[in-house]
Image (cartoon, rainbow, N blue to C red):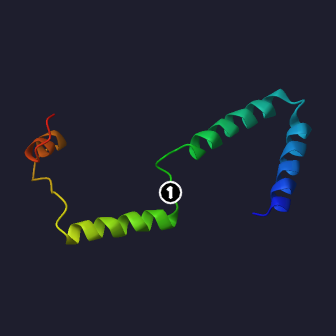
Amino acid sequence: MTAVQLNAMNTELWQSIGAIADCEPLMKRLTRYAKKLVKAKNDPTLMTKEEFFAKIEQAEQQMERSEYSTLLPGEDLTTHLKRLGYDI
């Protein structure tokens, strides 16, 4: 996004906020929505489509190199990690 586009979007946002500033219910809704956006922005689990497929590719390469482990039938995660040598 160019600086001009960003500036235009910023101006439009502030104009829209100004238009609803005198309406308490709308401002409350806007505030709740803004909090959700901030939370989503800070979510470390979010990734782009390219990042997702890169992780899949990396996991497939690890599998080809036998760098993986498999849960045995009926085995829970704690037992599995202990079997791999982790002190839990």
Q: Is residue 28 left or right of residue 56?
A: right
Give the residue type that dot 1 points to: Met
Task: Residue under label 1, please give it.
Answer: 47
Residue 75 percent across, percent down from the top left: 11, 46
Q: Residues within 10 Å of mark 1 (few under 14, many from 20)?
A: few
Q: Quadrant of the N terminus?
A: bottom right
Q: Residue at x 63, y 40 (%)?
A: 38
Tell me the quarter of the picture where residue 14 sits: top right
Please name whichever residue, 28 or 49, is drawn nearer the observer in this view of the structure: 49
Please name whichever residue, 85 or 24, is drawn nearer the observer in this view of the structure: 85
Give the vertical position of 45 relative to 39 (above or below).
below
Q: Quadrant of the C terminus?
A: top left
Residue 31 percent across, percent down from the top left: 72, 33
Q: Is residue 1 left or right of residue 40?
A: right
Please name whichever residue, 77 or 88, is drawn nearer the observer in this view of the structure: 88
Residue farthest along the top direction in this orientation: 24
Q: Residue at x 38, y 63 (%)?
A: 55
Residue 47 percent across, percent down from the top left: 50, 57
Residue 56 percent across, percent down from the top left: 36, 66
Q: Secondary structure at mark 1?
A: loop
Give the vertical position of 58 relative to 35 (above or below).
below
Q: Is residue 16 left or right of residue 66?
A: right
